[in-house]
Amino acid sequence: MRDRDRMQRHREVPIWLKRLDLVRDELRGMRFPRTAEEGVNQCAELSAVSMALFKEEIRRSSGARDEETVERETRRLMARFSRIDERWKDIRRKERVTSKGQ
């Protein structure tokens, strides 16, 4: 009986484990941070670069010349994104509560 249970568990191998060689090959090309500090530094650098690109796009699309106008528009858009995100979270939260209650 125990042997049969072991064989049953042996047959139920997760798909990612069956294709571990594909996962390994995909991850081989990536470089992960060695320490938490390095990871935080990478995150900060990526954030700074994305914010610079965002401001450049605002500058280009609005035709603003001075930095104050670009900064004001950046803050306005970030506040708008934040409100949209909060609304989306509220909707998702209500959907989860409704689906659990049924």
Image (cartoon, helix red, strand yellow):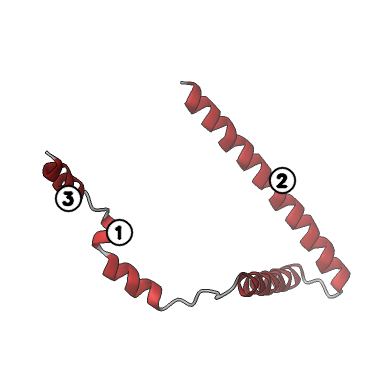
Could you tell me residue 102's position as x and y percent? 46, 21
Task: Give the residue type at disc 1.
Answer: Trp
Q: Quadrant of residue 94?
A: top right
3 or 1: mark nearer the eye = 3
Q: Who comes first in sequence, dot 2 or dot 1?
A: 1
Which image quadrant for residue 75?
bottom right
As drawn, the residue found furthest toward the top would be: 102
Indicate whether 32 appears above or below 6. below
Q: Residue at x 69, y 52 (%)?
A: 81
What residue would you read off at disc 2? 83
The residue pinned by badge 3 equals 11
The answer to which quarter of the image holds residue 90 is: top right
Residue bearing mark 1: 16
How far is disc 3 from disc 1 in space, using C-alphas? 14 Å
Q: Find residue 98 and report its horizontal and vertical position in percent.
A: 52, 25
Q: Residues within 10 Å of mark 2 (few under 14, many from 20)?
A: few
**Image coords of residue 96 (percent x, y):** 52, 32
Give the number of callouts.
3
Q: CA distance from mark 2 to mark 3?
A: 48 Å
Q: In the rendering, at what x and y percent does residue 77 appear?
A: 74, 56
Q: Residue at x 51, y 74 (%)?
A: 32
Q: Nearer the viewer, mark 2 or mark 1?
A: 1
Nearest to the observer: residue 67 or residue 48 = 48
Mark 2 or mark 3: which comes first in sequence? 3
Q: Is residue 96 left or right of residue 41?
A: left
Q: Amino acid at mark 2?
A: Arg
N-terminal of the pair, mark 3 or mark 1, is 3
Mark 1 surroundings within 10 Å by alpha-carbon count, few (fewer than 14), some (14 through 19), many (20 or more)? few
**Mark 3 nearby-residue class (10 Å; few <14, some 14–19, many ≥20):** few
Q: Amino acid at mark 3?
A: Arg
In what element is the residue under mark 2? helix
